[in-house]
Image (cartoon, helix red, strand yellow):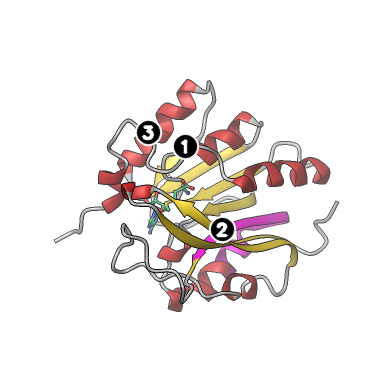
Amino acid sequence: MKRKNPYDLRYSDEEYYWSGKPSAMCDRLVDLVRRMKIPRPRLLDLGCGEGQNAVYFARKGFDVTGIDLSRVGLAKAERLATEAGTTVAFICADLIDYKIDRPFDIIFSSGAMQYIPPANRALRFKQLKDATGKSGVHVMSVLVEKPFLPLAPDAEDDVQLFVSGELMGHYGDWEIIYCIEEIFDCRSSGVPHRHAINRVIARRYGAGD
Ligand SMILES: C[S@@+](CC[C@H](N)C(=O)[O-])C[C@H]1O[C@@H](n2cnc3c(N)ncnc32)[C@H](O)[C@@H]1O
């Protein structure tokens, strides 16, 4: 029997399950892209959820595609785009094996890449890098396991967090232009808890400004 997507339930309230605010990485990326002079950056948001980051980029003039497995999240994301007077191509698809059939300048993902099983990650990151144009930039934020932080109360049984340093390892052949690991407070599920997150901005060498 097909398992119900837990995010459908989480996203079913009018309220935003996450903060509803764009990630701190959004402004950072917009600044970078401005310096790189990419006219209408094509951006793919993997695991876009309720769409706040995708809509933010669309409002800044990016050509945005957002994919997620939760149809409930995508419906909310569509609504957000309409309210903002902008357009995003939202697609219900699995980020683990979604076949990217057109080039993107930027691949962005916030809090979703840990759903890729560790054994598949090396291949998947390679495919994503191959699918990124010559001015390619990746902006990845992944949840990281820390021995001093208990698993979040709403964590799924099958989620496998990254380990410290793992994300950078997928970009050894790219230029790392930003990397931070930080701990933040979260109130998802209504129970206060903390996460560790590793954020990396990497770009194909030679794509620089
Ligand atoms: C922690 S939420 C982050 C959502 C959004 N990126 C944000 O920053 O608010 C993780 C998202 O990944 C999506 N997701 C989980 N597994 C997925 C998969 N295999 N393919 C596509 N999306 C997936 C969930 O539906 C959820 O929206």
Note whether 179 is above or below 74 in the view shown: below
Which residue appears at 35% of the width and 33% of the height?
A: 15
- Which segment did they paint magenta? 126-143
Nearer to the camera, 170 or 10:
10
Q: Residues within 10 Å of mark 3 (few under 14, many from 20)?
A: many
Residue bearing the label numbered 2:
141
Decide which of tag 2 and tag 1 comes sooner along the chain: 1
- Give how far apart the Cα atoms at labels 2 and 1 are: 17 Å
Q: Is residue 25 left or right of residue 155?
A: right
How far is disc 1 from disc 3 in space, using C-alphas?
11 Å
Residue 61 % position (x, y): 66, 31
Q: Nearer the viewer, mark 1 or mark 3?
A: 1
Q: Quadrant of residue 114?
A: bottom left
Residue at 47%, 57% (x, y): give it: 99
Task: Indicate if the residue with disc 2 has its beta carbon within 8 Å of ligand 1.
Answer: yes
Q: Amino acid at mark 1?
A: Gly
Q: Look at 57% across and 74% down and name the residue there.
A: 164
Looking at the rendering, which quadrant does residue 37 occupy? top right
- The residue where tag 3 is placed is 76
